[in-house]
Amino acid sequence: MIKGEQFICEFCETKIEVVNPGEGKLICCGELMKRVIDEEIEKRHIPKINIDFGKAKVSLDHPMEEDHYISKIELLSEGKVLNFVELSPGDEPGTTFKTENLSIGQLNSLKARITCNKHGTWDSR
């Protein structure tokens, strides 16, 4: 969990905001609480992946400022990380990975995952 994230109980509608980030699960009414996702935040954090001619280009429209940036971009296939790039403030929010040595099965299951220092981890769709 990340500071500032909000969660809601789908049963009693209790809302909370994370003040002290950490690991663990938030439970209310005996069920896992659901993360509240603002549409604008979601739009800026879902990576786009374009696969073409032995390359997978990952891009997104995200700031790369000192206090808010993408720290990592990962390329996954069949649930496993194939490659990753670490980024810093000021870098471009995207990268290109080589894919020429991947099987058809691996290419068909490619996904991108990004990590934002403020809003956590997001996967491509």
Image (cartoon, rainbow, N blue to C red):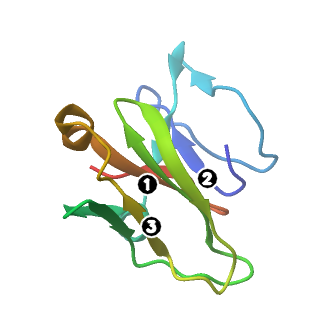
Q: Are marks 2 and 3 in contact (CB under 8 Å)?
A: no
Q: Secondary structure at mark 2?
A: loop
Q: Secondary structure at mark 1?
A: loop
- Indicate whether 97 appears above or below 88: above
Residue occupying image coordinates x 65% and y 87%:
90
Q: Are marks 1 and 3 in contact (CB under 8 Å)?
A: yes
Would residue 119 appear left or right of 94 to someone viewing this image? right
Is the N terminus in the top left, top right, bottom left or bottom right quadrant?
A: top right
Q: CA distance from mark 1 to mark 3?
A: 7 Å
Locate residue 6, reporting x and y percent.
57, 50
Q: Nearer the viewer, residue 27 or 1?
A: 1
Q: Quadrant of residue 7?
A: top right
Q: CA distance from mark 2 to mark 3?
A: 11 Å
Of labels 2 and 3, earlier in sequence is 2
Q: Residue lying at the far front in this picture: please name it.
A: 101
- Indicate whether 15 appears above or below 64: above
What residue is pinned by disc 1? 37
- Indicate whether 36 appears above or below 41: above
What residue is pinned by disc 2? 5
Instruction: Report the disc number at residue 41.
Output: 3
Would residue 35 appear left or right of 110 to someone viewing this image? right
Q: Residue lying at the far right in this picture: please name it.
A: 20
Locate residue 67, reporting x and y percent.
73, 77
Q: Quadrant of residue 105?
A: top left
Locate residue 98, reporting x and y percent.
37, 59
